[in-house]
Amino acid sequence: MLWLGALIGIVSIAEAQGFKSIRDTEIESHLLGLARPMAQQAGLADDLQIRIIIDPSFNAFITGENTIFVHSGLILEAASVYEVAGVLAHEIGHLASGHVPGRAQTASDAALASVLGVAAAIALSASGHGEAAIGAAIGGADQNLRIITKQSRQDEAEADEWAIRLMAEQGYSLQPMANLMSRLAKQRLLPANRQSQYYQTHPGAHERSIVFLNHALASESTPPPPSLVAEFKRIKAKLRAWTDPPNQTLIRTDDSPFATAIAAFRLSDVDFALELMDARITAEPTNPFYHEFKGEILLSAGRTAEAVEAFRASLEHLPKHVNRGQILLSLGRALLNQGDQDSLNAAIPLLEEANRLEPKWAFAKHQLGITYGRAGRVVDADLILAERALMLRKPKLAKQLATRAKNHQQADAFQQQLALDIITATEH
């Protein structure tokens, strides 16, 4: 289908982690707008990132790299934007407390690391199976399970303390989180296969609901401002349009024209999608995300010159605090697809900047490598593609590319050293 080609830059397989993820500048910017002030209060570095995992379950987790992974189901099922803010605050609490390495040590102490690996042994595991996965793996090792469960409950309580403090300092009402914990607590009565992943990977919901409720009752409960509610509603509609079957989106009467345009795009109805986006741009000419999506539609249709114009308009109107990496990548791809030398030369610095802003995105490295190759910069192409291979846990390919770069007659001293660094990394 037509839309799949254009969405390579939007929807990608995060191969290194094994997750299917969606990259969307507007959605990520909204969530970071909630999370970053709290992360700064917690003393975390300014490079906090949020990634959306396409998964209908209500869950979120961290990996220890200052990144919060949020399931699409968490956003779509949340009754309030403050529920999402509370979950983000909770995960920030885990990061601030160093719980990922701490739980790795707990797993080691319990002699589980050799069986499960650290990632599967912790309740914050990316698989989301939590205690159920641990129990299945260790069988009758009840003592080990008690060690893990006890540490997990302690960590959840500590992260909740952070969440309560961070939300209070931001003026976020705690009542939505109390309501969420109350709903989760009721799941203890359900069979394990019907319990949500969030309940299974964040134990102690009943006790935690009481803590949140007590704090909510002791504090003033103010609703989120209308502008924040409207923004949250918009990103929910947009995310639903990307994840639901497009025909379902088209028959919903409460979705935005933007969501309808996404559904039309996914059904390869380019003309209708463009018609809807042109109407949106006429109504809100400075909305950068309307121009961005129009560019994606045009790029998918092979109308690269118009796509370049749309992406440039998006960048012109994008607020300075929003990460420009994804839109720069799209603009670079559009220029690359134009095929002439001037466009190729213009694409290189844009894709280099996109790679700088998105250093953990393998697709950005892939596009930059292709561009270097077309420009005849074969050493640079091999090096950036070797970095990508290393990121995707393909050490043999990384070593092969780095070795070829190191031995190339045009490789300078800096490139040779970078190649050696990559080769060394493949051997550890």
Image (cartoon, rainbow, N blue to C red):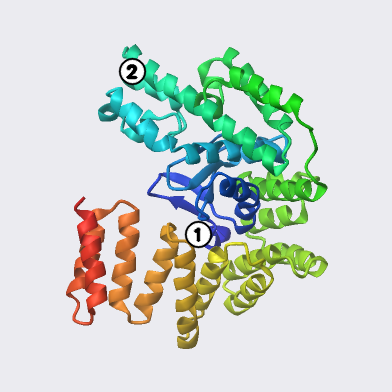
Q: Which residue is mark 2?
A: 144
Q: Quadrant of the N terminus?
A: bottom right
Task: Give the residue displayed 40% in from the left and 30% down from the top.
Answer: 122
Residue 356's x, y, as percent? 45, 66
Task: Give the residue displayed 30% in from the left and 68% down from the top.
Answer: 383
Crowd rating for badge 1 (residues with CA inside 10 Å; few <14, some 14–19, many 20+): some
Q: Look at label 2 and name its amino acid.
A: Asn
Query: Residue 131 vs residue 74: left or right?
Result: left
Query: Residue 297 vs residue 221: left or right?
Result: left
Instruction: State the image quarter where residue 270 is shown.
Output: bottom right
Q: What is the secondary structure assignment of the residue under circle 2? A: helix
Instruction: State the image quarter where residue 293 is shown.
Output: bottom right
Residue 203's x, y, as percent? 52, 22
Task: Give the residue displayed 39% in from the left and 16% down from the top.
Answer: 146
Residue 420's x, y, as percent? 20, 65
Task: Between residue 287 and residue 13, name the one nearer to us.
Answer: 287
Q: Nearer the viewer, mark 1 or mark 2?
A: 2
Q: Mark 1 to mark 2: distance in Å? A: 43 Å
Does the CB distance between marks 1 and 2 fall below 8 Å? no
Q: Which residue is mark 1?
A: 8
Query: Residue 396 vs residue 307: left or right?
Result: left
Q: Which mark is residue 268?
A: none
Q: Look at label 1 and name its amino acid.
A: Ile
Query: Residue 391 vs residue 213: left or right?
Result: left
Instruction: State the image quarter where residue 211 is shown.
Output: top right
Figure check: 167 above or below 210: below
Choose the circle earlier in sequence order: 1 or 2: 1
Q: Would residue 260 be visible to someone looking at this image?
A: yes
